[in-house]
């Protein structure tokens, strides 16, 4: 799958995004926007990434035509840190468009416990680059891990351009809620966060200190509460359900 008409996408999302660009192939859309200093409102979509970046320094697989891989530039001048809630807005946006999806804290987008999308933000004050990769149409043999899936493999077929515009519009609305500190964002996050109520095991550092317990909620800073003790995204290496 590929973008057919980037101008039509731009026209549909002009309220939120002023410069929607598309490239056939690049290393990483996040890295490109970090490097070129693009203005807030810029979006870069790629059919293929050859050096996609994932969380914790991992490689992110984006085979040609299988994923909606894109990054966007946000201005955070008027929205000072902490940015805990910024990382949840894009995930909620995906669940707006894909109602079958849920979020594993903080922002892994899953269907039936399998990951369909990942989100990676990079701070470059006063900009934040938010990157998202959504598995739209993948062959089972291209899935990077057993715990991943794709929309088509879950019986969800989309028109790529329409889907891209819908995701960008939802992103725009949810990021605006974040900028306006609208409590609805967190309320909606809690509704779609499958981690709440789960027994989990949490690694603070790779292979080190482990916390086990029940996820009792997500606090107003977006931190996960394990038996009511808060842990922020920056403190957690990995969180895994234990049942
Ligand atoms: C994760 O590991 O869950 C986050 C993956 C984020 C991938 C997206 S694809 C578009 C953007 N460009 C990148 O290099 N990474 C992000």
Image (spheres, helix red, strand yellow):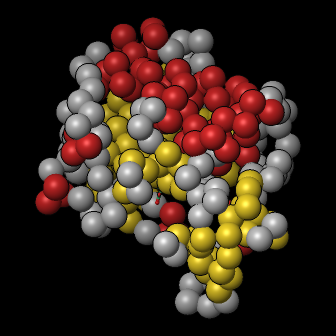
221 to the left or right of 61: right
Q: Give the camera-side residue of 144 and 7.
A: 144
Q: Is residue 216 visible?
A: yes
Q: Give the camera-side residue of 131 and 102.
A: 102
Q: Residue at x 63, y 40 (%)?
A: 191
Q: Give the camera-side residue of 204 and 230.
A: 230
Residue 102: x and y in percent read 50, 45
Instruction: Indicate the quadrant where residue 40 lies.
Output: top right
Residue 84: x and y in percent read 74, 52
Q: Residue at x 35, y 38 (%)?
A: 68
Q: Residue at x 50, y 54 (%)?
A: 108
Above or below, 186 relative to 123: above
94 to the left or right of 182: left
75 to the left or right of 115: right
Above or below, 14 relative to 76: above
Q: Residue at x 52, y 21 (%)?
A: 169
Residue 165: x and y in percent read 42, 20
Farthest bottom residue in view: 208
Instruction: Indicate the quadrant where residue 115 lies.
Output: bottom left
The quarter of the picture where the N terminus appears is top left
């Amino acid at each position: 799958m590929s973008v057919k008409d980037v101008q039509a996408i731009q026209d549909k999302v002009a309220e939120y995004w002023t410069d929607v660009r598309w490239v056939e192939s690049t290393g990483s859309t996040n890295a490109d926007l970090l490097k070129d200093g693009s203005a807030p409102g810029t979006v870069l979509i790629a059919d293929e990434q050859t050096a996609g970046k994932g969380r914790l320094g991992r490689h992110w697989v984006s085979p040609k035509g299988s994923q909606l891989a894109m990054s966007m530039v946000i201005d955070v001048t008027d929205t000072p840190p902490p940015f805990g809630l910024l990382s949840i807005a894009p995930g909620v946006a995906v669940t707006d468009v894909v109602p079958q999806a849920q979020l594993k804290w903080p922002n892994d987008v899953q269907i039936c416990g399998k990951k369909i999308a990942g989100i990676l933000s990079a701070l470059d004050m006063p900009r934040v680059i938010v990157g998202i990769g959504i598995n739209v149409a993948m062959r089972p043999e291209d899935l990077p891990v057993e715990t991943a899936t794709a929309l088509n493999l879950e019986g969800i077929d989309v028109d790529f351009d329409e889907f891209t515009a819908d995701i960008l519009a939802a992103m725009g609305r949810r990021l605006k809620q974040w900028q306006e500190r609208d409590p609805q964002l967190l309320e909606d996050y809690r509704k779609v966060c499958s981690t709440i109520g789960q027994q989990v095991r949490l690694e603070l550092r790779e292979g080190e200190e482990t916390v086990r317990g029940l996820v009792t909620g997500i606090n107003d800073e977006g931190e996960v509460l394990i038996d009511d003790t808060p842990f922020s995204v920056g403190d957690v290496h990995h969180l895994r359900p234990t049942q």
